[in-house]
Image (spheres, rainbow, N blue to C red):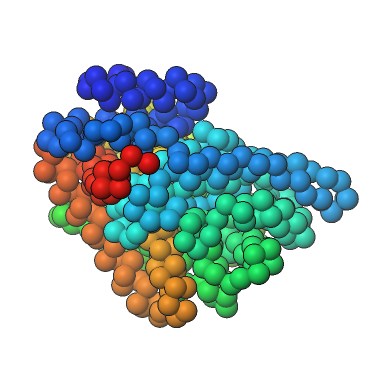
Amino acid sequence: MTSLKNKYLQQVYEGVVKRDPDQKEFHQAVFEVLQSFEPVIKKTPELFENGLLERLVEPERGIQFRVAWVDDKGKTQVNRGYRFQFNSAIGPYKGGLRFHPSVTASIIKFLGFEQIFKNSLTGLPMGGGKGGSDFDPKGKSDAEIMRFCQAFMTELSRHIGADLDVPAGDIGVGGREVGYMFGQYKRIRNEFTGVLTGKGLSFGGSLVRTQATGYGLCYFAQEAMATMKKESFKGKVTVISGSGNVAIYAAEKAMQLGAKVVAMSDSSGYIYDPKGIKLDIVKQLKEVERERISKYAKMVPGSEYHEGCKKIWQIPCKVALPCATQNELDGEDAKVLLKNGVIAVCEGANMPCTPDAAETFIAAKIVFSPGKASNAGGVATSGLEMCQNSERYSWTAEEVDEKLKGIMVNIFHNSFNASKEYGMEGNLVAGANIAGFLKVANAMKAQGVL
């Protein structure tokens, strides 16, 4: 990363690095956001008074805690838990919980910081937060996962609440884990409230929540391609990394919109099916059997499995949807995608493109959207679940899907319009950062120095 042109923005960034020198993912997220703000400083300098940016890049509260639990062999295991409550200017903290061995304070802070702008973009009253643990659910029994989730929530419960902080799922945290944590919260607090989203339908969950991030990604991408390139998914060869909820339901919606999805992946490698991925088989492997995606190649003649995920971006495609994890697509991958004729790259994961890749796509003037905009469908539907919980009412799948589509279309247009207003038309990274920031900044300014 190069230095920022504006002296004040550079000072803010250097302050972040000095305070937490080892948190590289967090540094990356802050730098990417700050570099969008130079035209905003010129146009509305009053927004940056009273240390607003210095407050924005520092979490309002950071919690780290020990999680001790007992495995099936009777041995005590110890993991580390986190919750960073970043900003509550526009509503209660909202953001997922990630259970994965890669989880560190830096990862959670980068995710929480991104969540501020993502939640703001939805138009719903939600602040930004994120949490998780270095616990790995893979290979664990249901009983072990239940005991871990109960131990994790025993500590977390004292820091969250329906009007304070409402966690959800993320990588490694699905309906099973949310259910165990909700049960423990209810037991400890002796109350039934909408404290978690992503719950089961029988106890306050929302229809379409499972599909929301993937569907929302495609609603955003379809609107962006139509507006910026007069294109659509119809007939477009599409590559999607990942095979979790986001990737599976992005593939489902992309196919419904006419795309031909030819590749998907997991942490071990990727599959390539030139005839088009058979999504029912992927769902069976991942949602029912919890198997590696390599099994797909054994079940579908003509498909291929390749160890490692790196070369998935060498498959020629018109649309690329990175939906796996942070920094999975780098500058060299970006050059290959452009050489092969890609017209749209929309992030389904959180910050899956490195800064080099993002800069390459922006310079090429293709449709490129940051995760804080195009993967906001999950948290948007979580916000809709919160609304339903407050009403003690459930909407139909059609109602939720319609609201989700409207939110995603609005996020695109707000981001695109901001990019035009501040002299960077088509730069959706800058547009999303600015549009998300302005709402939060105005709320912070109105509430005084806190």
In the image, what residue occupies the spot 35% across and 31% down? 54
Residue 9 placement (x, y as % from top left): 27, 25
Residue 30 placement (x, y as % from top left): 37, 32
Quarter of the image with the N terminus is top left
In the image, what residue occupies the spot 37% across and 73% down? 400
Outermost residue, right side: 74
- Number of numbered labels in the structure image: 0
Quarter of the image with the C terminus is top left
Residue 414 placement (x, y as % from top left): 20, 53
Q: Is 225 in front, or is 309?
A: 225
Q: Is 74 in front, or is 12?
A: 12
Q: On the image, which quarter does residue 51 sit in?
A: top left
In the image, what residue occupies the spot 30% across and 43% down? 448
Can I make out residue 128 in this image? yes
Q: On the image, which quarter does residue 427 sit in?
A: top left
Apparent side of residue 136 relative to residue 267 in the rendered image (left or right)? right
In the image, what residue occupies the spot 40% across and 70% down? 387
Apparent side of residue 361 relative to residue 24 in the rendered image (left or right)? left
Q: Is 106 in front, or is 193?
A: 193
Residue 333 placement (x, y as % from top left): 38, 33
Apparent side of residue 352 relative to residue 282 in the rendered image (left or right)? left
Q: On the image, which quarter does residue 186 sit in?
A: bottom right
Can I make out residue 345 in this image? no
